Image (cartoon, rainbow, N blue to C red):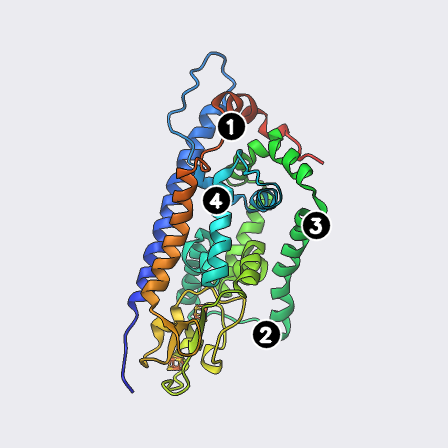
Amino acid sequence: MEKIDRSYLRYLRYAIQWSIFFFLIYAGYNFYLFVDYFSSDEVGAPLIPPVSRPPSVEGFLPIGALMAFKLWLTTGIFDRIHPAGLVIFIAAVMMSLLLKKSFCGWICPVGALSDLTWKLGKRLFGRNFTIHRFADYPLRSLKYLLVLFFIYLIVVKMSPLEIFTFLEEEYYRIADVKMLYFFTKMTLVTFITLLILFLTSLFFKNFWCRYLCPYGALLGILSLCSPLKITRNEDACIHCERCTKNCPAALPVGDKVRIKSPECTGCLTCVSHCPAKGALDMSFSKRRILNPLIFAVLIIGLFFGAIGIGKITDRWNSAVTYEQYKRIIPQTSILEHPR
Ligand code: SF4
Ligand code: SF4
C-alpha cells in the first residue's frame, strides 16, 4: 500500500470555518452597537450611528430568505429589505446542488460550534455516545418534517403577492433586530432550551445538525443532486475503518463505494484520515476524481463569489433607512408577526 497524509485538509477546513465564525462574532458585535444606538428614542440625536450595519447578519434569517427566494424565482423581484440574506441563501443552495452539503461543513458557524461542542464532550467524558439506530432514524426525520412544514407554508400556501406584502411589513424590516434580541434579551425558556441543546451536543455528535436543523435538511435534500460524492476504491482500500470512525455524520464510509446520503457535509474528514493512496476521494464517478484542494477552492469561490456578485449588483445592502430604524427599533418588542 502506498501511504498518504492529507491531514492538512482538516486544518484547512477549521481555518475557513473558524475565520467565518469570528468574523460573524465581530459583525454581531457591530450590529449590537448599531441597534443599541437606535434603541433610544431620544429626540434630536444625530442620525449617523457609530458603526454601520453589517449586512452579513441577515444570514441568520433563512425563513425570510426562503420566502424571498420564491418571490425572486416567481416574479424576478429581489428582496430589498434583507438582500444579503437572500444572497447567502442562494450561495448555500448552489453549493448544495454542486458540492454536497458543503455550506454546513465549511461555512456555517453553528456547524463549527456544534463540532467544537462534541469534541469538548469527548475530551471531558472520554467518548461520545450514539443513539440506537431504531431511535436515530425517526429522530433524523424530525428536521425533514420541519423543512417540509416550511416548504408547505411558504412554497405551496403563500402567493408571491402575500410574500411581497410580508417582506415589506415593518415586522420584517427589523427581523434581524428580533434575532439579535433572541440572544441579548434571552427569556428563561430560550436559555433552558439552548442549555439542553448544548448538553445534548456534548454527548451526541452534532445533535442540532443531525436531528433538528431544517436549513441543513433542505440543503441535504438538494445535495442529492450533487455530481460529486465521496467515493471509495475497493482495490486501494485496506479496510482500516478510519473513515467510518471519524465521519462526523456517522456514515458507514468504509462499507460503501459511493456516499449518496443527504447527511454528508462534504467536510472531507474521512479523506483526510484515509492512509491509503487512491482509496478515498471526492469524485464525479469512480474514476473521475476531484483534487480535494480544488473542492475546497470551489466552496470558497462559490460562497464568496456569490457575495461579490451581490455587492457589485447592489444586492447586498438593505434599503431600510436610518430614519426607519430610528422609528421602528424602539417598537421592536410590541411589533406583532403579521397574520
Ligand atoms: S462521508 Fe466524509 S465528507 Fe461526508 S460527512 Fe462523512 S467525513 Fe464528511
Ligand atoms: S477508505 Fe476508509 S477503510 Fe479504506 S483505507 Fe481509507 S480510511 Fe481505511
- Mark with earlier residue (4, 1): 4
For the point 38% across and 48% down, the residue is 305
Secondary structure beneath label 2 = loop
Q: Which residue is mark 4?
A: 87
Q: CA distance from mark 1 to mark 2?
A: 49 Å
Looking at the rendered structure, which numbered label has been put on residue 266?
Answer: none
Q: Nearer the viewer, mark 1 or mark 2?
A: 1
- Mark with earlier residue (1, 2): 2
Q: Which residue is mark 1?
A: 320
Q: Which quarter shows the N terminus? A: bottom left
User: Residue 183 at x, y = what percent?
Assistant: 51, 41
| Side of 174 relative to 106 (left or right) | right
Amino acid type assigned to the residue bearing label 4 in the image: Val
- Mark with earlier residue (1, 3): 3
For the point 51% across and 28% down, the residue is 320
Q: CA distance from mark 1 to mark 3?
A: 28 Å
Secondary structure beneath label 3 = helix
Amino acid type assigned to the residue bearing label 3 in the image: Val
Amino acid type assigned to the residue bearing label 1 in the image: Val
Q: CA distance from mark 2 to mark 3?
A: 35 Å
Q: Determine whether 11 is above or below 165 in the image.
A: below
Residue that sits furthest to the top in the current view: 44
Looking at the rendered structure, which numbered label has been put on residue 156?
Answer: 3
Q: Quadrant of ligand 2?
A: bottom left
Looking at the rendered structure, which numbered label has been put on residue 132?
Answer: 2
Q: CA distance from mark 4 to mark 1?
A: 17 Å
